[in-house]
Amino acid sequence: MRPNPPSGTDRLSDQDVLDAMARIPGYLDISVEDFRDLYDLAREQARQRLFAHIRADGLMRTGIRPLLAERMLDQAAAEMAGQDLKALPVVDEHRRVIGILTETDFLRRLQATGFLDLMLNLMADPAGFSHRCHETPVSTAMSAPAECVGADADFAAITRAFARGGGRSLPVTGPDGRLLGLLLRKDFVAACGPEPAT
């Protein structure tokens, strides 16, 4: 079965094919279109082989302590720091994911564009800063709905989810929407790198 051809800059141009064919000694009895089809098939085969081992359930971090929507931001910050994470899923009483709270959500809620801006805001208005942290529930600041993947998500599905969500973490959920783990973008990128030499 022929894979869907790549689009945009990934697509071979006629000139790419002609240049490549000119570098092969001897006569090639193959059309530009046949060459492109062969390339597309080989590219898809290589992608499947190289990334066949990648699944969300094999890369996700388990034992994550998620947040409840009614927790206050200061408690959420302590929980995130205690787990050394930059984001945590927010779940309901049945552990179904209803959102995600990220460092970016904190900055937005605290009206800061970055760490230095946050420090300046804190120095300028410590009382207002404290109010926003101690009296703001997670439900007010979280991003919802959260972009999630299933445990069986493969390389392509994970890549699409990270592209859609734009964050550094993806909750991994079961068919019922309950939290199973958290997939960090850095773990995904590391798994996509070259395999260690044996």
Image (cartoon, rainbow, N blue to C red):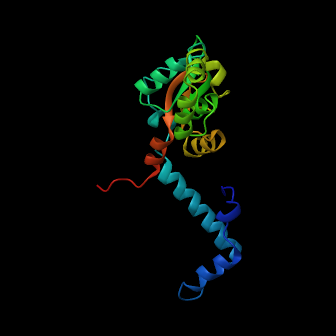
Viewer-side residue, 135 vs 91: 135
> Which residue is drawn at the image coordinates 51% and 41% (left, top)?
185
Extreme residue in the top direction: 93
Q: Position of residue 4 (x, y in %)?
A: 69, 56
Q: Is residue 150 visible?
A: no
Q: Position of residue 1 (x, y in %)?
A: 66, 55
Extreme residue in the bottom direction: 26
Q: Position of residue 165 (x, y in %)?
A: 64, 38
196 to the left or right of 19:
left
> Which residue is drawn at the image coordinates 67% and 65% (left, top)?
9
Q: Is residue 114 visible?
A: yes
Instruction: Tell me if residue 144 comes above or below residue 22 in the rendering.
Output: above
Which image quarter: residue 102?
Answer: top right
Viewer-side residue, 194 vs 34: 194
Instruction: Tell me if residue 120 comes above or below residue 99 in the rendering.
Output: below
82 to the left or right of 148:
left
Instruction: Tell me if residue 49 comes above or below residue 186 in the rendering.
Output: below
Extreme residue in the front direction: 124
Viewer-side residue, 42 vs 153: 153
Number of labels in the image equals 0
Q: Position of residue 162 (x, y in %)?
A: 60, 42
User: Quick one: quadrant of the C terminus?
Assistant: bottom left
Which image quarter: residue 187?
Answer: top left
> Which residue is drawn at the image coordinates 54% and 22% (left, top)?
179
> Which residue is drawn at the image coordinates 70% and 76% (left, top)?
14
Instruction: Tell me if residue 11 comes above or below residue 165 in the rendering.
Output: below
